Image (cartoon, rainbow, N blue to C red):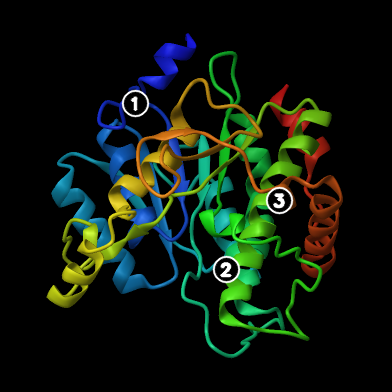
Amino acid sequence: MSKSARAEWDPWQLPPQDGRSYLVTGANAGIGFFTCEQLAKAGAHVIMSGRHPNRLAQAHDALEARVPGASVETLLLDVANPGSIRAAAASVRGGLFDRTKLDGVVFNAGIVHSPRSRKITRDGRELVFSTNALGHFVLGAELLVPLAKSASSRWSPRMVWLGSVSTRMGRHEPVDLQLEEHYSAWNAYVQSKVAVQALGIEADARLRDAELPVHSVIAHPGYSIGGRTPRVSGVNEPSRLKRLRDGLQPIAQSKEHGAWTVVRALVDPESQGGDYWGPKHLTRGVPVRQRASATSADPEVRRKVWEACERLSGITWPVDKAARAAR
């Protein structure tokens, strides 16, 4: 595909995804829901995951209503709970779903509006970092082998990490991942997203070194807000005041459009490991290749974040096992 052809990517006309299966975390609302909807419209089988059974069921029903004939299932998964991650991944690996292969996973679930005071998970990890970054590091390890098994001469499975435009607003080097000394809601969010992007880039480097045909890609959705997003019962129901307030922000876009970058990173045949996708006009627009923040791409930062996640989770990615599975 030529550069000019890639520039003409149409988010309304995706390449057919029939026969492919994708897992999306945090699928019951926002970017996650619209990512699932766009994949389902293109013919993919979608596993919508989330931690609230009722909200997940509402999102499932809403998607089926909006995409008649959609192939979609649900999976309970709390990315801040290691036990929940292991149980969900075991269900995927055990073939309990309609499709026996996994072609891609979107690490979307996360906390955007961080708590004002520091909170910890049941296993003693800082909540925002655990939800946005550490949990997806663990899920990536758990799903690496099934992803590798789906590799073929025509397709390299992808894992897409959700970055953020906020990572361009200062360095925010994650030297205190648990924020035990200086916690603030803003720093918790931005630092977690720097960590997510560092993990995505480092994963790509390690997968390449192992010659493993799984692509690690990063996408950020720009400034995507609920008041500019279509109303979907049980998924997105902004008040009139929020509609008015969000409508006065010209740099913003809908979460439906924010999902465009995620979907392109996942399904574009030209998307490669290590790519960083974002809206053309930084906060809004069609998805294009961009560059991650200097902090996220710093090899030393990447190494430290990766090793910290290994230490905090007690997990090492099974790269060698996945490489054997891909042969």
Residue 212, how many percent across, how many down? 74, 28
Query: In this figure, which residue is indicated by the disc labeled 1?
Result: 18
Q: Quadrant of residue 45?
A: top left
Mark sitting earlier along the chain (3/1) = 1
Circle number at residue 156: none
Number of marks drawn:
3
Mark sitting earlier along the chain (2/1) = 1
Query: In this figure, which residue is indicated by the disc labeled 3?
Result: 296
Q: Looking at the image, is 326 positioned above or below residue 236? A: above
Mark 3 and mark 1 residues within 8 Å of each other at the beta carbon: no
Gap between marks 2 and 3 measured at Cα:
28 Å
Q: Looking at the image, is 145 positioned above or below residue 74? A: above
Asked if one can make out residue 28 in the rendered structure from this viewpoint, the answer is: yes
Name the side, left or right, on which 81 lies relative to 72. Answer: right
Q: Residue at x 56, y 66 (%)?
A: 79
Mark 1 neighbour class, 10 Å CA radius: few under 14, some 14 to 19, many 20 or more: some
Q: Residue furthest bottom?
A: 117
Q: Secondary structure at mark 2?
A: helix
Q: Quadrant of residue 132?
A: bottom right
Residue 319, how many percent across, how many down? 79, 39
Asked if one can make out residue 102 in the rendered structure from this viewpoint, the answer is: no
Mark 2 neighbour class, 10 Å CA radius: few under 14, some 14 to 19, many 20 or more: some
Amino acid tagged 2 = Ser
Query: In this figure, which residue is indicated by the disc labeled 2?
Result: 84
Amino acid tagged 3 = Ser
Q: Secondary structure at mark 3?
A: helix
Residue 248, how many percent across, how many down? 22, 64
Residue 133, how many percent across, how many down? 64, 62
